[in-house]
Image: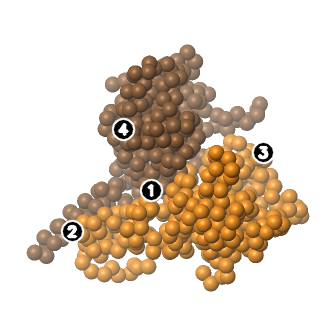
Amino acid sequence: MSGKPIIEIEDLFHTYMIGTPMEHAALKGTSMVVNEGECIAIIGHTGSGKSTLIQHFNGLIRPDSGKVIIDGIDLTKKRIDIKALRRNVGLVFQNPEDQIFEKLIGDDIAYGPFKQGLPLKEVRERVKWAMDMVGLNFEEMKDRQTFALSGGQKRKVALAGILALKPKILVLDEPTAGLDPRSRNELLDKIKSLNKLENLTVIFVSHNMEEVAYLADRVYVMADGTDVLSGTPEDIFTDKEKLQRYQIGTPETVQALYRLKDLGYNVTTSAFTISEAADEIIKVLTGGEVENHGK
Amino acid sequence: MEPIIALENVSFSYKINETHSVPVLKDVSFSVFPGEYVAIIGHNGSGKSTLSKHLNGLLTPSTGDVWVRGHNTKDESRKLDIRKSIGMVFQHPDNQIVATIVEEDVAFGLENIGIPREEMKQRIDEALEVVKMSDFRKRPPHHLSGGQKQRVAIAGVLAMQPDCIVFDESTSMLDTFGRNEVLQVMKKMNRMGMTIITVTHRMSEAAEADRIIVVEDGTIVMDGQPRDIFKHKQVLMDLQLDVPAVSQIAEIVHHHIPNFSKEVIQEEELINEVKRVSKARSGEVV
């Protein structure tokens, strides 16, 4: 969290279809700061403005008013280097089918780097690296047809296509929806290592509180077009009043601990991981501290 | 008892071109009986989505047969009966809503099959009541939350009075609240006698069913009660699956406190086990 701000958003407004009967204010003065190398989760209900917000990050949507500075590029200016912006910000949408159009997996992932004019050898290396990052075997999968893939595999291909562009900021909309448990865990681990080891700034929208707890350094909660709450996952998941007010879910572990706490057991509800939650229960049952575990 | 759905040696391949095809289902046989609550689990690409599309004739087998209430899904003349009998709820709430007012959306299917006005009204009332969306009947659906939209979609299916509802990853796009709402509705409908088949990646959801079918590489590798299925943690892990979070917690607690059962698969059971062991322990002290 030591990096300098790479995304600065202040008092951002965006209204769709201004001046028509369909006019709809999606963002009403939202603010957010993301530092280089951070992993940020954005949570909130359908229609809270999450998707509109993240589409500002690579200039798909331009602000009506407010400050939006992405990696030094001021989006409120009329003339901006959109190519540089798109090179630096990789956006993976929710429906992976939307982003796949080549017949073969390898070609699809190579499309972006190829269009950037990189030499073939480097394109190949990047495709291989990106496929490895998402857990697709290069030799086995590169010549497979994209249309016969399952939903989860398509998601991996779409993500690899973005990673192959080597963006500085990775933006993911519901990255693991529809993935089986192992694919999910593997993908989360990959995102974590990209974030921690390669210093990639990651911003993701999620409904899945397990992955928010596992990945995010900080969380922004959106409601009705503004950021209503932000903090570490621990701050958010231990504030029962706010969880209820904004109808925020918790990981299954925290959910079970809250129920025990309500029954009068002395447990801490900030234990997100399986082993931390188990430790809390052991502590209650043995009436003492647990050796060899802890955060 | 007659099964609602019976699969007999079902195989299915996707054709890639004239000479090549990819086999997805390989000789699958099983039956689902009235009132059952079945979860189908399997990793991405295992064939479970293709399987679920066979249950109401959206896809028909390359070889083998699927029988719905005794009708073969290959029989075009029975298509409408089959679709009426087996309702489907899909993954994306937005893709299933067609009307601009909640009650009209629920009415959509009924209008298509020519249900008389009076009966239609009654069916809509009942369906919205079951999913607890009666207060929203005059509202436009696009401002609803994901869970509410899914419940409207369920009401639309329910109003058709099917024998069975198939949920194809219907909770995967929902947050914790939305998921719980939809799960409550599924359980309630099952208690009311509805046969439920749910395809899911969430082990805690599969744990709520009476029966779990595990699909791997186009075949059924396990079929049994959740408690028995989740005993095979290693097998599930090898199949890229898992056991519910509460089971994992219970296993660690059991390791430290042998009296604490490790055969816990639902949150409720975990809570009860903590209560039981805690009482027993305080008894020891006294």
* Comes first in the chain, label 1 or label 4: 4
* Disc number for residue A103: 3
Q: Which chain is orange?
A: A
**B166 or A129, which lies in front?**
B166
- Tell me the residue at 33%/57% (across/down): B267
* Comes first in the chain, label 2 or label 4: 4
> Which residue is outermost to the left?
B286
Q: Which chain is disc 2 placed on?
A: B
- Colour of chain B, in one word, is brown
Placement of B28 over or under A288, stated as above or below? above
**Disc 3 secondary structure class:** loop
Q: Which chain is disc 1 placed on?
A: B
**Disc 1 secondary structure class:** helix
Name the residue tied to disc 2: B278
Q: Disc 2 and disc 4: Cα gap in Å?
A: 38 Å
**B212 or B156, which lies in front?**
B156
Same chain under badges 1 and 4? The reply is yes
Indicate the amino acid at tag 4: Val
Q: Which chain is disc 3 placed on?
A: A
* Disc number for residue B130: 4
The percent coordinates of residue A222 (x first, y second) are: 54, 63
Same chain under badges 3 and 1? The reply is no
Q: Quadrant of the N terminus of chain A?
A: bottom right
